[in-house]
Image (cartoon, grey):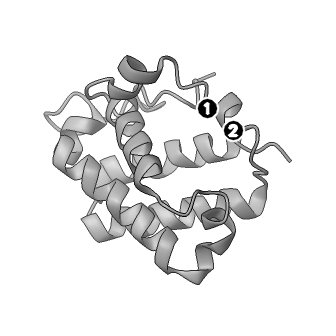
């Protein structure tokens, strides 16, 4: 079984072109930050994401920074999150928050909008959609 919290190679081994990691295929740091900003902009502004928005602090600054740092390493770039906070322990860190199908689906829809906004498509988009779906489902605790 593939660890749902680590992107690693796609199960079918599909490449991202000449790049070796999703991080490189996306365009690195700048694109990762743009995805995170678009994700939280949608969460903050779109009533369709009110349930997951309510799980966050009023200010999203810390959440933006943590997701950016996590995605950097998770996508194969610099391991910013682990360098600062240690192992992500995603389920443990999210355990205090009620995460069911509604929250999972809102998170995935919000991320899909962010990826659309940034123009992520092709093989890397298919890979990310699949991996995000696994991670989001793994986070469910109810």
Image quadrant where residue 53 sits:
bottom right
Residues packed near mark 1 inside 10 Å, few (<14), some (14 to 19) or many (20 plus): few
Residue placed under numbered mark 2 in the picture:
138
Residue 121 x %, y %:
29, 60
Whichever of callouts 1 and 2 sits on the residue coming sooner in the sequence is 1
Residue placed under numbered mark 1 in the picture:
90
- Foreground: 62 or 120? 62
Compared with 110, 85 (above or below) is: above
- Foreground: 63 or 132? 63
Q: Residue at x 32, y 27 (%)?
A: 80
- Foreground: 130 or 28? 28
Q: Residue at x 42, y 62 (%)?
A: 39
Q: Residue at x 27, y 47 (%)?
A: 32
Residue 20 x %, y %:
22, 27
- Asked if the residue at tag 2 contacts the one at tag 1, i.e. Cβ–Cβ closer than 8 Å, the answer is yes
Compared with 35, 96 (above or below) is: above
Q: Is residue 48 left or right of residue 132?
A: right
Describe the element under mark 1 as helix, strand or loop. helix
Residue 23 x %, y %:
26, 37
Residues packed near mark 2 inside 10 Å, few (<14), some (14 to 19) or many (20 plus): some
Compared with 124, 115 (above or below) is: below
Q: Nearer the viewer, mark 1 or mark 2?
A: 1
Q: Is residue 105 left or right of residue 142?
A: left
Describe the element under mark 2 as helix, strand or loop. helix
Q: Quadrant of the N terminus?
A: top right
- Foreground: 129 or 104? 104
Q: Residue at x 70, y 29 (%)?
A: 92
Quote the CA–CA distance across marks 1 and 2.
9 Å
Q: Is residue 78 left or right of residue 115?
A: left
């Amino acid at each position: 079984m593939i660890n749902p919290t680590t992107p690693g190679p796609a199960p079918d081994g599909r490449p991202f072109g000449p790049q070796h990691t999703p991080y490189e295929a996306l365009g690195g740091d700048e694109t990762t930050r743009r995805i995170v900003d678009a994700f939280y902009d949608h969460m903050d502004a779109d009533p369709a994401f009110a349930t997951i928005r309510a799980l966050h602090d009023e200010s999203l600054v810390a959440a933006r920074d943590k997701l950016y740092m996590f995605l950097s390493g998770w996508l194969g770039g610099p391991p910013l999150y682990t360098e600062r906070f240690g192992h992500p322990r995603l389920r443990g860190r999210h355990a205090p928050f009620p995460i069911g199908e509604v929250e999972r689906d809102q998170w995935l829809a919000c991320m899909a909008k962010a990826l659309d906004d940034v123009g992520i498509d092709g093989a890397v988009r298919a890979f990310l959609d699949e991996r995000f779906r696994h991670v989001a489902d793994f986070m469910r605790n109810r």
